[in-house]
Image: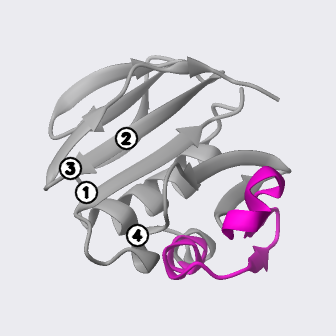
Amino acid sequence: MRKVSKEIAEAFMKNENKRMGNTIIHPVSEWMTKNERGVFLHDNKIAWFENNHPSKNTLSNNIHLCFSMCGWDTPTTRERLNAIFSYVFKSDSVYLKQIKGEQKLFINDRQIEINENLNYVIRSVNGNVFLDDPVKKTG
């Protein structure tokens, strides 16, 4: 994992503003009143929490991490998302990988084809990790 991806993932989990090269963490404009944050790569929102940030809700075992490749199935996008997955789920059991030109999401050894133009939600509920059905990207 590259240093920039590691630092971005750490800042995202700590709910901090951060800018490193082409990657920024800052409040998502439509959620600014809730003080939620998103990770932006080249001004594309690639990761955000659907509900409260985990660091604000320490009593909950539920995490709802949203992500999108925003149409950019690049090594950099995958690496930033994989770093975030590693920090959020505290393991290497959730990761993206390109196989024969197709984007694949692995969750506990289950392989799921990913459309780089859709939004996804990975949920961890009481330690069980699963993927919701994808939704079309809006705005």
Query: On the image, numbered disc 4 is attached to which residue?
Result: 54
- Checking the image for residue 92, the label placed there is 1
- Residue type at mark 3: give it: Val
> Is 122 colored magenta in this rendering?
no
Cα distance, mark 3 to mark 1?
17 Å
Q: Residues within 10 Å of mark 2 (few under 14, many from 20)?
A: many
Residue 12: % across, % down: 57, 72
Q: Earlier in the sequence, mark 4 or mark 2?
A: 4
Magenta-colored span: 7-35
Residue 36: % across, % down: 64, 65
- Residue type at mark 1: give it: Asp
Is label 4 or label 2 in front?
Answer: 4
Q: Earlier in the sequence, mark 3 or mark 4?
A: 4
- Checking the image for residue 122, the label placed there is 2
Cα distance, mark 4 to mark 2?
14 Å
- Residue type at mark 2: give it: Ile
- Checking the image for residue 125, the label placed there is 3
Cα distance, mark 4 to mark 1?
19 Å
Is label 3 or label 2 in front?
Answer: 3
- Total number of numbered labels? 4
